[in-house]
Amino acid sequence: MNVIFYIAAIVAIVATLRVITGTNAVHALLYLIVSLLAVAVIFFVLGAPFLAAFEVITYAGAIMVLLVFTIMMLNLGQAAAKQEKSWLTAGVWIGPCILTVILLLEFIYIFSSADQYGSVLHPVSPRQVGETMFGPYVLGVELVAMLLMAAIVGAYHISGEKQKNYHRFFENQNEEI
Amino acid sequence: MSAVPLHMGLLLAGILFLLGLVGVLTRRNVLFMLMSIEIMVNAAGLAFVVGASRWMQADGQVMFLFILAMAAAEVSVGLALIVQMHRQHKSVDINVLERLRD
């Protein structure tokens, strides 16, 4: 199990690196799907089979399909990939990379000194998750449902109509002219 | 069956989160920034699941389900904004939005 965890972790990190360095949007998206599937494997190893299935169905399935359709709608071609390559210069990369490497070293230092917390491989059954979700957390489930409803209405409202003017004041001004 | 150490799981979550952070900081394409935010959200969820399996409590997994719903809502609104931006400015460059009007 340990070996499976490390292999999946390396796959996830490499795929994520390809996402943030990629120039072609579709290729980056496919690498992102690989990364999410690797995280699903990690969930399975950590003893969360319900969430592993959920990660595949919702994240790698539904959300990524949404992104794929949007990229198809935007229809970014070869020119966009070239422009993307011209944006990715060393000057842009170097500052954030140094800062995040510092943060990573701090992470490694903290977690290597926190070894006494022991190991993680205790499966939590889907039954337990369901009982907790619809027991103490039932209010959270309701709130999440409302959040999703608001997101649907908001997305429809934002992307639906074609805005001509930014404010009705300018619209009246145009009519007068 | 040998167990996975706790700090390795948390370290992986941290590395994935920092990779997403680098993506948000360095990319100018809004689509890539949205993908990097997805990576960060997913890494935070991974940390929750690691905690859940360490303490054998289902709370962390329930939190991951909430994070999943939040990510879905965020992506749908974010993509609608990107589509609208591409429609108005014919570009997905974040620097175009510096000029607030026109």
Image (cartoon, rainbow, N blue to C red):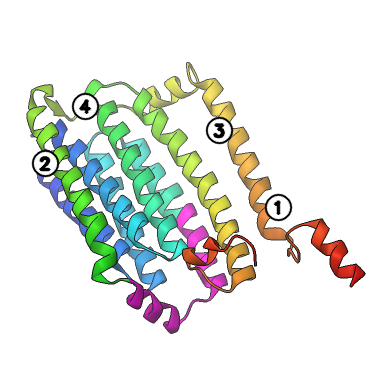
Q: Name the residue under label 4.
A: A122
Residue A95 in the image: x percent, y percent?
24, 57
Q: Name the residue under label 2.
A: A2
Task: Name the residue type under label 3.
Answer: Val
User: Crowding near pointer 4: few (<14 within 10 Å), some, many (20+)?
Assistant: some
Q: Mark 1 lies on which chain?
A: A
Q: Mark 3 points at which residue?
A: A144
Asked which quadrant contains residue A161, the reply is: bottom right
Q: Which of marks 3 and 1 is nearer the N terminus?
A: 3
Task: Name the residue type under label 4.
Answer: His
Residue B19 seen in the current view: yes
> Is residue A106 positioned above or below A142 on the image?
below
Q: Name the residue under label 1.
A: A157
CB atoms of marks 3 and 4 within 8 Å = no
Q: Mark 2 lies on which chain?
A: A
- Are callouts 1 and 4 both on one chain? yes
Q: Which chain carries label 3?
A: A
